[in-house]
Image: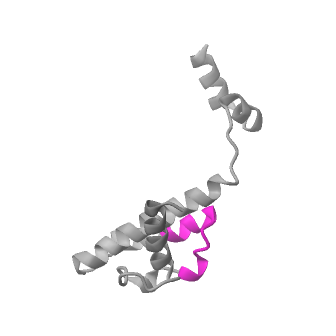
Amino acid sequence: MDQVGDVLAGFAAAFTGESAGAGEIVHPERLDRARLDYSTASVRVVDEYLAHLHDNPPDSDEQKWARTVLGTGAYLSEVIRRDAARARARTFDDAAVEYPGPAVRANRNLAA
């Protein structure tokens, strides 16, 4: 892994609780870390956590907020990176075959 990737992986590991990292995030008790497995489904767990923070912003020091933002971003980046290995590139026509419907037909008409 490259140097930037190593740094991001470190922030992601701290966010999930896999490593102590540089300190704790904001409201760690609201993040169900047991469900953070780097799957695309785990993004919902992160979304629930962020929704809580949005609705209940705590008075916290700037360093905790910085760790929270960096950890969240690093975790989501790692989810994307890991999922990309399983994904396959698709064209619009490939998607149209898999998901036929009015929106696809409308987009085809616009392209014509």
Residue 6 included in the magenta stretch of the image: no
- Tell me if 34 is positioned left or right of 61 in this view: right
From the image, give the main secondary structure of the stretch colored magenta: helix
Q: Which residue is depicted at the point 67% across and 54% down?
A: 85
Quadrant of the frame with the N terminus: bottom right
| Residue furthest to the front | 2
Residue in front for this viewpoint, 82 or 35: 82
Q: Which residue is depicted at the point 30% across and 78% down?
A: 64
Write down the region rendered in magenta: 33-46
Asked which colour scheme the image uses, the reply is one colour
Residue in front for this viewpoint, 99 or 33: 33
Residue in front for this viewpoint, 100 or 81: 81
* 56 versus 96 height, above or below: below
Viewer can see residue 57: no
Residue 38 included in the magenta stretch of the image: yes
- Please state the horizontal and vertical placement of residue 107, each as a whole percent of the image: 60, 24
Quadrant of the frame with the C terminus: top right
- Count the numbered circles shown: 0
Rendering quarter of residue 102: top right
- Please state the horizontal and vertical placement of residue 57, each as a whole percent of the image: 29, 75
Q: Which residue is depicted at the point 62% across and 31% down?
A: 103
